Amino acid sequence: MYARDVPPGQIFYHGTKAGLKVGDLLAPGYGSNFVERALAHVYFSATLEAATWGAELAKGEGRGRIYMVEPTGALEDDPNLIDKKFPGNITASYRSVEPLRVTGEVEHWLGHTPEELQAMKDGLARLEAEGKAAIED
């Protein structure tokens, strides 16, 4: 895990149910989709696939949304996904202690099937029951 600057021209995404507009900041200090506590980091990805999962699994009411975001500071590989199983950050998942600025919204995106979504929720529930779903923060 290491802090680094944002690569020039890189597009990042964040999936949520929050209604945001261009220029808004997503800051650390809010709860996650997986633990019941405020987080010291804000999480995001360079892949639309990961952001889709975030939008679909987000807590709260309303529809899932995917925003294009830009980090306002250094980022690091997400240690919750980067371990011996996924060396090299093949999931393109990151986190930062600095806010993310919303630069746009992905208006049209394809979600997962109800079966895929349920399988993911079941898998997360199993990890939680085993005590392995804790977010390192």
Image (tube, helix red, strand yellow):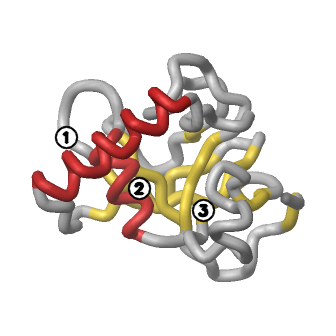
Instruction: Choose the circle earlier in sequence order: 3 or 1.
Output: 1
Instruction: Choose the circle earlier in sequence order: 2 or 3.
Output: 2
Q: Position of residue 20 (x, y in %)?
A: 39, 40
Q: Residue at x 52, y 48 (%)?
A: 23
From what the image shows, is residue 128 above or below residue 14? above
Are there few (<14), some (14-19), or many (20+) residues within 10 Å of tag 2?
many
Q: Residue at x 47, y 71 (%)?
A: 47
Residue 88, quarter of the rendered image: bottom right
Please state which of the two labelled residues, at mark 3 or mark 1, is closer to the viewer. 3
SS at mark 2 in the image: strand
Q: Quadrant of the C terminus?
A: top right
Residue at image mark 2 = 67
Q: Tell me the tag on residue 32.
A: none
Q: Position of residue 111 (x, y in %)?
A: 20, 61
From what the image shows, is residue 98 above or below residue 3? above
Residue 123, quarter of the rendered image: top left
Q: CA distance from mark 3 to mark 1?
A: 22 Å
Please state which of the two labelled residues, at mark 2 or mark 3, is closer to the viewer. 3
Residue type at tag 1: Arg
131 vs 40, left or right, is left
Residue at image mark 1 = 63
Residue type at tag 3: Ser
Q: Position of residue 15 (x, y in %)?
A: 40, 50
Badge count? 3
Residue at image mark 3 = 93
What residue occupies the far top of the structure in this picture?
37
Q: Quadrant of the N terminus?
A: bottom right
Q: Position of residue 86 (x, y in %)?
A: 64, 70
SS at mark 1 in the image: loop
105 vs 4, left or right, is left
Are there few (<14), some (14-19), or many (20+) residues within 10 Å of tag 1?
few
